[in-house]
């Protein structure tokens, strides 16, 4: 669906302000097989990216040697969002090798 690619391309300065670096557009979705709630380190308010009904929650993480961010859409009214907490969406400043 390329939702994150679009967000990161349309609002690169918002993502850079939040993370301190320019992110590679898009996320790598990983099915971890069980619910894994996000541990929020910081967030982008949806109003900053023209999505006032949801915020984006960020959790700092590592994939092997790469520092990255788990990003979880968070619908303000329901707490739901993304593909569910069994699928984590990862972004970082470089293309993640698959």
Image: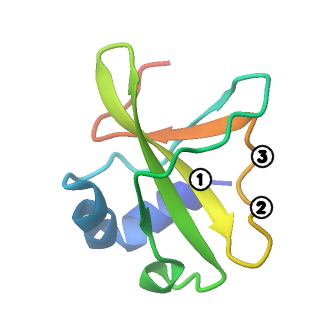
Quadrant position of residue 28: top right
Up/down of 35 relative to 83, above or below: above
Label at residue 45 = none
Quickly name the residue at label 2.
Answer: 80
- Quadrant housing residue 53: bottom right
Residue that numbered label 3 is attached to: 84
In the displayed image of the protein, which residue is found farthest to the left?
20
Q: Return the disc, 1 or 2, that comes first in the chain's sequence.
A: 1
- Give the distance between the C-alpha atoms of the residues marked 1 and 2, in whole angstroms: 9 Å
Which residue is found at the position 63% from the left and 75% from the top? 54
Residue 45 is situated, as x and y percent measured from the top left of the image, at 47, 76
Q: Among all residues in the image, which is located at the extreme top? A: 64
Task: Tell me residue 6's x, y (percent).
Answer: 50, 64
- Colour scheme shown: rainbow
- Element under disc 1: strand
The residue identified by callout 1 is 72
Of the residues under marks 3 and 1, which one precedes in the sequence? 1
Query: From mark 3 to mark 1, how far is it between C-alphas?
Result: 9 Å
């Amino acid at each position: 669906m390329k939702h994150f690619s679009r967000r990161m391309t349309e609002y690169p300065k918002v993502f850079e302000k939040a993370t301190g670096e320019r992110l590679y557009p898009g996320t790598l979705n990983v099915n971890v097989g069980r619910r894994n709630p996000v541990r929020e380190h910081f967030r982008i308010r949806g109003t900053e990216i023209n999505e006032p009904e949801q915020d984006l929650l960020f959790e700092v993480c590592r994939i092997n040697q790469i520092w990255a961010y788990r990003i979880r859409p968070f619908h303000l009214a329901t707490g739901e969002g993304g593909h569910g907490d069994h699928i984590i969406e990862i972004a970082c400043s470089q293309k993640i090798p698959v």
